[in-house]
Each structure stands twice: as C-alpha cells, then as structure tokens.
C-alpha cells in the first residue's frame, strides 16, 4: 500500500511538472520598426536598439549565449559585435509585465567611404545552440566616411519639432555653416543619412530666424507646409564668402509617418571647383522612448517558443 501511495505521489509530481512546462509563457519581444540613421565616427561608439520583453531571465537576453548578430534584409547584410545588453525596470503594459531590453552593437567590419542602406531590416541573432531570433526593426542606414576637410565647420545645429501625422518628430533642421578659408565655398546639397525621410531642397532658406516653438510654415512665412510630398533629388546653391557664417533652414519630407529623432547629415560643397563634404554626426535631437501609446499601431509582436 505504501508503494502505491509513493507511486501516486511521483505520478502527480510528474504531471504537475508537465503541466507547468506546458503553461510556461513563451518569450515575447516587441519592436517598433522605424528609421535609423547612424554615422560611424568613433571605434568606441555603439548603436542601440531597444525591444520590449515579457521576460528578463531568458537565455536569449544574455550576451554569453549569443554567437552572431547581423542586421539584414533579403539583399543586404551588415554584421555586428554585441557589446552588451541592458535590461530596464519592469513595468505594466497591456496587462503584462514588460521591460525595455537595449542591445548595444558595434560593426564587425569598418567599411571605407560607404553608406549601407537596409530597408525593412531585421535584427537577426544566432545563439550557440543553433537557435535564432529575427526581429523587424525598420530601415537602417549606416554611413562610413571621413567627417570631411577642414574648409568648413559647424557653428551650430538645432531642430524644429511638430506633430507629423500624429507623431511628434523633427520637422526641420537649422544649421550654422562656417567657412574657415579665404576662398568662397559653394554649398550644393544638404542631405540626411536616410531615405524615408529627406530634405526638401526647394524649401531650403538662408539667413532665416526661427523662434522656439515655431513651425516650418511659421519660419517660411507660409500658411501651411505639407510633409508627405515625394522626395526630390536636386542641388541647392548657397555661397559662403571667406570666413562667413550662414544659417540655413532645411525643412524635411516624410515618406510615411515615423518618429525621426536621431540622424546624421551630409553637407556637400565645392571649393575651387573641388567637391568636398562635411558630415554632422548622428545626434538625438529629441530624446523620447520608442515605446509610447501613440506608437502602438506600429508595434510588431514576436512570439518566440
């Protein structure tokens, strides 16, 4: 009889373990695909990608288990080293306990004078046991290039912010460009390291003063400004006389609604007929979390068994 009782206890315990394993929640990772714009300016620099996770102790969130990391689509791939993973404090979201998991990455190979554009990119993480996690993260643009010559300097840069299709984002940038030479500099283009968001050459204005809180339309003296026009690739013409500083207002265009808060800028110019460029490093013009109530329609939920 004792043996029967013991057998029943073992059977009940085994069934409890099986039911517990069946009831264990899968790992859920939530991303907010958007436009990323990076410039490689320092070997110590790391790019950061954030995801929401319903777990903080899953092995897939530990650096030691990661074998390989890449950002890729069907056409292009860029390999990265995983420097570290940080996990924020848990909070309640959609009746679940979630935490922000931040991945800090460095390029595996530093390219020379190249811009890598990976539209509809995935963050692909491969683990030592052969398993793999693929997360949709949006468009990734990464510029590898010298910052430019000493002919031009950046005197200052700031951004204007507006509600663009329900998302607070950068509506224009205002740059102060400095001619450091005794020659005339001819600015021919001011472009973003991005594609879904671009500058609007026809609306670029010089020596315009924009007060804090002004809209693009206010700065341009217009009744309104449309952000979703087709991008246009055309040259501009702004002259900087010797040692002159000029303020240039650069309105933006949006291919689709997206938060666009941090990005790199390329200023192209000519001096004595020679083409040059100056790169303005990616800078967080607006510091906000990628996970907000307004952004929820764009979230992508990844359930990982």
Image (cartoon, rainbow, N blue to C red):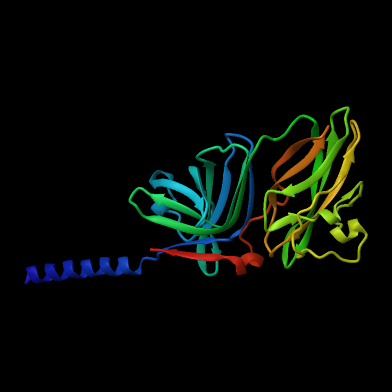
Kindly identify the residue that appears in the image at 26 percent across and 67 percent down. 18
Residue positioned 58% across, 61% down in the render: 32
Q: Nearer the viewer, residue 50 or 148?
A: 148
Q: Nearer the viewer, residue 153 or 236?
A: 236
Query: Where residue 290 sits in the image (x, y, percent)?
Result: 62, 57
Q: Which quadrant would residue 147 be assigned to in this image?
A: top right
Tag count in the figure? 0
Q: At which x and y percent is residue 125?
A: 44, 52
Residue 225 sits above or below residue 289 on the image? below
Left or right: 165 in relation to 273: left
- Which quadrant of the figure contains the N terminus? bottom left
**Residue at the location (50% across, 44% down)?**
80
Residue 153: x and y in percent read 80, 34
Q: Quadrant of residue 176?
A: top right
In this picture, residue 267 sits left or right of residue 244: left
Say which quadrant the C terminus sits in: bottom left
Looking at this view, name the residue that lies furthest to the front.
Answer: 273
Can residue 215 be seen in the rendering of this structure? no
Q: Position of residue 139 (x, y in %)?
A: 60, 56
Residue found 45% across the figure and 54% down from its top: 56
Would you place residue 282 above or below residue 23 in this image? above
Specify whether 250 is left or right of 119.
Answer: right
Q: Residue furthest top?
A: 182
Is residue 136 among what the camera can see? yes
């Amino acid at each position: 009889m004792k043996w029967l009782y013991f057998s029943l206890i073992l059977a009940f315990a085994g069934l409890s373990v099986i039911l517990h394993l069946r009831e264990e929640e899968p790992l859920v990772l939530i991303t907010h695909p958007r436009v990323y714009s990076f410039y490689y300016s320092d070997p110590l620099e790391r790019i950061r990608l954030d995801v929401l996770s319903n777990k903080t102790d899953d092995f897939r969130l530990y650096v030691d288990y990661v074998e390989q990391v890449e950002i890729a689509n069907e056409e292009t791939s860029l390999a990265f080293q995983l420097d570290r993973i940080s996990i924020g404090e848990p909070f309640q979201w959609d009746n679940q306990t979630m935490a922000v998991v931040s991945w800090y990455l460095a390029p595996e190979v530093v390219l020379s004078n190249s811009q890598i554009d990976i539209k509809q990119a995935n963050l692909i993480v491969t683990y030592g046991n052969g398993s793999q996690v693929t997360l949709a993260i949006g468009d990734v643009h990464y510029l590898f290039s010298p910052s430019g010559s000493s002919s031009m300097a950046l005197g200052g840069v700031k951004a204007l912010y507006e509600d663009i299709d329900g998302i607070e984002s950068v509506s224009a940038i205002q740059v102060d460009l400095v001619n450091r030479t005794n020659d005339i500099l001819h600015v021919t283009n001011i472009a973003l390291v991005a594609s879904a968001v671009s500058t609007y050459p026809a609306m670029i204005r010089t020596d315009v003063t924009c007060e804090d809180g002004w809209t693009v339309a206010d700065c341009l003296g217009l009744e309104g400004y449309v952000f979703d026009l087709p991008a246009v690739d055309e040259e501009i013409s702004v002259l900087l006389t010797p040692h002159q500083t000029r303020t240039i207002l650069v309105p933006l265009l949006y291919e689709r609604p997206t938060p666009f808060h941090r990005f790199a800028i390329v200023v192209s110019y000519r001096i004595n007929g020679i083409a040059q460029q100056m790169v303005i490093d990616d800078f967080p013009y607006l510091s906000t979390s990628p996970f907000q109530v307004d952004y929820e329609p764009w979230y992508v939920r990844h359930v990982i068994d």
